[in-house]
Image (spheres, rainbow, N blue to C red):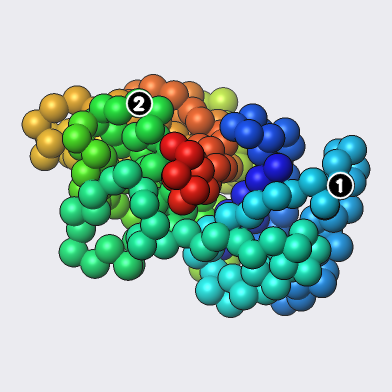
């Protein structure tokens, strides 16, 4: 089995693949204060709860946008699963041409999403990842990673409203009943959810205008299922796109894809 791990700023998404089938997946809070041993104990416990065993892992791949945790997870994988993880970077064979100014600045999660999406669709793409930040990545029909945009994520925006104002509370990120809020909480939810959908749609329209053509628009990330129904441009939600990209990159590194 392949152990695929994506370390994000808010959550760690990871899964186990048997060949190309996702056998199990989990999401943990990203906590830089946790040690490799603590993460290892969690991983092993969850694997065993799923009726699997650590020794069944035959390979591992790791994507990280949290440098302080990268080495801890490398150590954890080596100690608990006895595998040396492949680390995602632009140096890997991605199957894409990175037509951006500084390829090594690209977040590994954005790269992994692009690899998976292009392999599945083989067309002009806009990939929207609703994570800590909301990112939009643009891929040409010929497989060029053209760049994109980065905006504050929905969670960051909600936290900023409550932490930077004296009277606005923390709110649950759920769909409000209407755009016109009848109280403070529903008004905040309207601005956050519907406003974020509007941000996404406007960015998609601008990107497509610059491309001079329509693109297939797909969404992923923890909050994609909340925003996608309110968007006029998102066509499909792919909740495990990042894990699928990690599995594909691992196979490409072994010459199997």
Query: Splitting the image into 4 quarters, where does residue 209 fall?
Result: top left
6 to 181, vertically: above or below:
below
Query: Splitting the image into 4 quarters, where does residue 17 fall?
Result: top right
Q: Position of residue 18 (x, y in %)?
A: 68, 35
Q: Which residue is mark 1?
A: 53
* Left or right: 201 as drawn, with respect to 39: left
Residue 167: image tag: none
Whether residue 65 appears in this view of the structure is yes
How many neighbours does mark 2 have within 10 angstroms: few (below 14), some (14-19), or many (20 or more)? Answer: few
Indicate which label's residue lies in the foreground, 1 or 2: 1
Q: Secondary structure at mark 2?
A: helix
Q: Which residue shows up at 80% across the image and 63% down it?
A: 80
How far apart are the two marked residues, 1 and 2, measured between alpha carbons?
Answer: 34 Å
219 to 95, vertically: above or below:
above
Q: Which residue is mark 2?
A: 121
* Left or right: 132 as drawn, with respect to 126: right
Give the tally of numbered discs.
Answer: 2
- Frontmost residue, 2 versus 233: 2
Q: Which residue shows up at 46% across the image and 51% down it?
A: 253
Q: Which quarter of the rendering shows the N terminus?
A: top right
Q: Which quarter of the rendering shows the C terminus?
A: top left
Mark 1 or mark 2, earlier in chain: 1
Q: Which residue shows up at 72% across the image and 76% down it?
A: 33
How many neighbours does mark 1 have within 10 angstroms: few (below 14), some (14-19), or many (20 or more)? Answer: some
* Left or right: 80 as drawn, with respect to 237: right
Q: Which residue shows up at 13% across the image and 27% down it?
A: 213
Q: Secondary structure at mark 1?
A: loop
Q: Position of residue 125 (x, y in %)?
A: 29, 33
* Left or right: 149 as drawn, with respect to 100: right
- Frontmost residue, 123 versus 216: 123
Query: Splitting the image into 4 quarters, where does residue 214 fall?
Result: top left
């Amino acid at each position: 089995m392949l152990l695929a791990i994506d370390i994000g700023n808010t959550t760690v998404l990871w899964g186990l693949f048997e060949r190309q089938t996702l056998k199990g997946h989990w999401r943990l809070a990203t906590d830089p204060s946790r040690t490799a041993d603590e993460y290892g104990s969690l991983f092993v416990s969850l694997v065993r709860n799923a009726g699997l065993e650590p020794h069944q892992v035959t390979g591992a791949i790791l994507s990280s946008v949290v440098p302080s945790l990268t080495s801890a997870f490398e150590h954890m994988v080596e100690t608990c699963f006895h595998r040396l993880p492949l680390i995602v970077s632009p140096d890997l064979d991605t199957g894409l041409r990175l037509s951006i100014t500084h390829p090594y600045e690209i977040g590994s999660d954005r790269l992994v999403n692009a690899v998976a999406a292009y392999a599945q669709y083989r067309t002009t793409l806009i990939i929207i990842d609703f994570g800590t930040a909301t990112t939009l990545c643009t891929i040409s029909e010929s497989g060029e990673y053209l760049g994109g945009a980065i905006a504050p994520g929905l969670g960051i925006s909600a936290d900023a409203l409550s932490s930077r104002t004296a009277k606005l509370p923390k709110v649950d990120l759920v769909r409000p009943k209407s755009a016109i809020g009848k109280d403070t909480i529903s008004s905040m939810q309207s601005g956050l959810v519907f406003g974020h959908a509007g941000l996404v749609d406007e960015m998609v329209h601008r990107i497509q205008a610059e491309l001079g053509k329509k693109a297939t628009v797909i969404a992923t990330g923890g909050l994609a299922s909340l925003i996608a129904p309110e968007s006029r441009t998102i066509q499909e939600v792919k909740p495990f796109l990042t894990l699928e990209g990690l599995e594909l990159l691992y196979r490409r590194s072994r010459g199997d894809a």
